[in-house]
Amino acid sequence: MVDLNRRGLVLAAGGAMAAAGIGASSWAAPVAAPSGRKLGYAIVGLGSYGLGVIIPQFKHCQNSRLVALVSGDPAKAQRVAAEYGVPERGIYNYQNYDGIRDNPDIDIVYVCLPVSMHAEYTIRAAKAGKHVLCEKPMAPSSADCEAMIAACKQAGKKLMIGYRCHFEPYNLEAIRRARVGEIGKLRYFRSEHGFTANNPSAWRLKKAMSGGGSLMDIGIYALNAARYMTGEEPNAVYATERTDRSDPRFREVEDMIEFELEFPSGVLGSCMSMYSANQNHILLMGDKGRIELEPGTGYRGNRLWVGNGRENEITPPPGPGANQWAGQLDHMAQCVLQDRQPIVPGEEGLRDIRIIEAVYQSAREKRRIALRA
Ligand code: NAD
């Protein structure tokens, strides 16, 4: 039996409820954003996500600005700093990273590194007196996640995980409609997530750097959606893995893994993750209808249908930010400014990693694994 911390359940369900505009704290009536005040972010890792996706979002933010970069490539750091107006004093490398403690411009460190580096750079940031937003998956192991949470707690700093879909309008609208009972009593959840991993030398395919294969990287969207869409925590998992180990991409990590989640209400969750085809789909079935998203967790172009099939397509109201990333960045800044707990704190990342560990154990041992609440 895998031990799950009950507190994470409350936080996760509360987060989804808040995101759905339901419950005591809600997105619909957020605490007023402190006008004009922008907190400074340092982006650690100028890779495809940190540089290609996150950095361009600051122009859409109300409470967040880019003030520092951490990169192992000095020429790239100079080029990016010049393009985005980051001052010379805001340029760091992995050796002088701890010097961020002496830079009062930096309030929040955003860790956009390979998964095996998340814990180290989160803990060093907390020790340097900075709040941390860390990318998903939180870390290769639940022990690392616990160390990250403890370090931030000890330093009195906030820790949030980069679960952008909690700020994405189509997902928020689907959660809201499920919670108000539009499809009746929820019975079944299904999600498939995958992409084609092409580069055998990529860190994602090295177990020591990624912590695992498709499940850690992309299947985590299906798992996290199962939790925020149902508003429940699974109490057991059963998983099957299919990987062609002769394929050079999959010597170290899994390709396909399928897992069932048993929820306390009787809802059955069925999730599929793969590195050998593109998939991005979420389906909720209730006794009065269905909610479907495809793609469901994309950067853009998500679509939502509510009803009995795909005849009723929904355009959701705007989310909490100009887009999911601006909403995420500003949410963290606002939590710091107002001393609030982020809706996707470290405990949310830990909960997914504990379930992922149970999914891997189930696939390995070919048996159902109960999760302790
Ligand atoms: P990437 O390989 O494109 O970038 C990784 C960065 O880390 C690069 O700048 C690289 O130079 C740097 N780095 C430092 N030390 C390294 C080392 N020893 N080995 C390899 N790289 C090293 O990866 P990415 O796609 O930007 O992913 C970074 C993080 O962002 C991961 O945690 C990933 O899961 C996450 N991510 C999240 C989303 C999302 O939608 N939330 C999307 C993509 C990636």
Image (cartoon, rainbow, N blue to C red):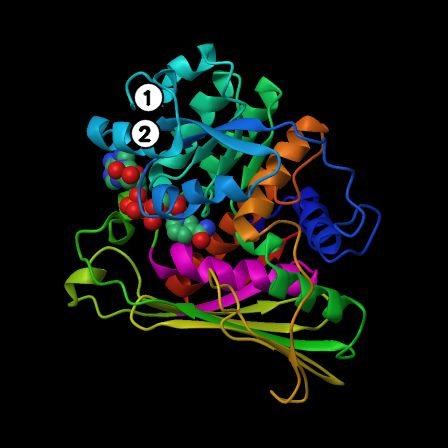
Could you tell me if the residues under marks 1 and 2 are in contact, i.e. CB atoms within 8 Å?
no
Residue 241 relative to residue 130: left or right: left
The residue where tag 1 is placed is 92
Amino acid type at circle 1 is Tyr
Q: Give the mark nearest the N terminus, 1 or 2.
A: 2
Disc 1 or disc 2, which is closer to the eye? 2
Region in magenta? 213-240
x then y, percent, for residue 181: 80, 73
Residue 338, picture quadrant: top right
Name the residue: 61% across, 44% down: 344
- Observer-nearest residue: 311 or 237? 311
Q: Which mark is residue 82?
A: 2
Name the residue: 22% across, 51% down: 202
> Which secondary structure is most common in the magenta stretch?
helix
In this picture, is 99 found above or below 69? above
Name the residue: 40% across, 36% down: 118
x then y, percent, for residue 352: 53, 51
- Observer-nearest residue: 294 or 188? 294
Amino acid type at circle 2 is Ala
